[in-house]
Amino acid sequence: MATTQIDNLDVVIVGAGLSGLRAAREIHAAGLKYVVLEAMDRVGGKTLSVPASSKGTGVVDLGAAWINDTNQSEMYSLAQEFSFDLVKQRDEGDSVVRAPDGKIDKVPYGMLAKLEPEQLERLMHLLQKIGELAEKSNTSDPSLTPNAETLDSVSLHDFVADKFKNEDANTLVNELVKALVGLESSYPSALYFLDTIKRAAGLANMISDGKNGGQYLRNRQGNQGFSVEIERGLTPGAVKLSSPVTSITQSATGCVVESKTGDKYTAKKVIMSLPSCLLPTVQFSPGLPQPKRLLSQSTKLGYYSKTILVFAEPWWLAADLSGVYTSTGTAISFTRDTCVPEDGQYSITCFHTGETGRSWSRLSAEERRTAVLAEFKTAFETAMGEGIPDPVNVIEKEWTKDPWTLGAPSPVMPPGLLTSEAGKALYEPFRNIHFVGTETADVWRGYMEGAVRSGLRGAREVIDALGGSSTR
């Protein structure tokens, strides 16, 4: 196959997920010459929307699923611009919970477990204290947070164990961390996780399915549509799919970017939207500075996968169930109702997270499906006291097994990194290479909102450096 060499570009953007494409849109508006190189055969990164079944027009999201219309203003603005129909997350009816001993109960929506009054009081106290600690985080410079070095020197697990001295507290926090970042609480530093909470408008909003919450609105047309629509507004042919970048060479005159296809691009600037832990997949010349290298060797992506069960009818609504199921130590960590009734799309999405998810992942495809269906049916049939229908379709997505993502949702920092030079280097440019991605976001790190905001920041850095003008 013939290779291509394109010279005299202003910018090469690496990655056609939300952060890379949002950067490209800003670069395009500034009148600069650019290309976007994407390793996958599609745009969207960790947003992926597919048909729910062959029997209807509805879609389901295998990746990032939610936005809101208040403190996620960039995503909401794009949803309005593209005339997407937003669906409120179901937040009523009873939920189903499975205790560590295997007992299954129904609880009011919003309850994490079947608790006695004194247990509930302790739980609310724990969440309140964690929220208060997070509010003290200095997101502009985490090293200036009160007791920053102490908080960054221990894992969240050890911090909670020492501060609350309650095994139930550690169990709850571990499940919370798994649900949010796909890792056990023994991995992130206490400071890093508190900082993440602060960037997500506080713990209450971060875990909420309601107004202002991280899980409030779904996109009827599917969240991959954001990237598809942004690409439509770019220069035709500017996005090069199936073009993983293998090397970036910097010199006094700019950058030479080479892809696995053998194509070469020369540009004044590069915007990188790769997660930090995937930077070693690219050869940099000169090599990345030591703080950047340490960062790329230390951050870790979580295990975060989905199995979506599509049904002919929403049987759980007639039983006044929310569609929420929560469990500890089993294949399914939690579920959510992901229906779009207007399209006849009735589904419940099962989330597999952390080490229990990794254990499930090691099963064969048939064994994984069998395990999910057996656990799901046992939970809901026990709660309802009667049988439930079989799904008409089962859709699975394991992001860890995708060669271009290797995990989800975004890289997490272990103890000692955030307050170090490596942590401070997260979004610092390296000569003519600028770094974006949701892990670098000032707000909503790990979410779509964080991705688009980081893309805007990176694009504006480049536009300012090149003496251009942004439209915003």
Image (cartoon, helix red, strand yellow):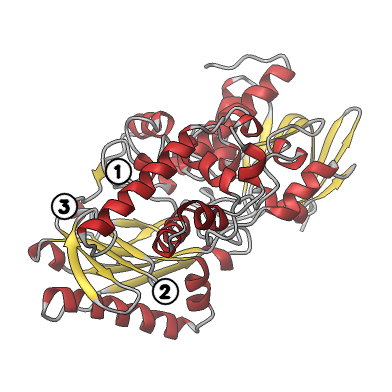
Q: Is residue 149 above or below residue 110?
A: above
x then y, percent, for residue 26: 57, 26
Q: Quadrant of residue 386?
A: bottom left
Q: Earlier in the sequence, mark 1 or mark 3?
A: 3
x then y, percent, for residue 427: 68, 35
Q: Earlier in the sequence, mark 2 or mark 3?
A: 3
Q: Quadrant of residue 249?
A: top right
- Which mark identifies residue 329? 2
Front position in the image: 227 or 271: 271
Q: Earlier in the sequence, mark 2 or mark 1?
A: 1
Rendered residue at 51%/35% (across/down): 452
- Which mark identifies residue 428? none
Q: Secondary structure at mark 3?
A: loop
Spatial distance from mark 1 to mark 3, Cα to Cα?
13 Å
Q: Amino acid at mark 1?
A: Tyr
Q: Secondary structure at mark 1?
A: loop
The reply, left or right, for residue 371 in relation to residue 45 is left
- Disc 2 + disc 1, Cβ < 8 Å: no
Label 3, on which residue?
92
For the N terminus, give its image quadrant. bottom right
Label 1, on which residue?
216
Q: Secondary structure at mark 2?
A: loop
Q: Residues within 10 Å of mark 3 (few under 14, many from 20)?
A: some
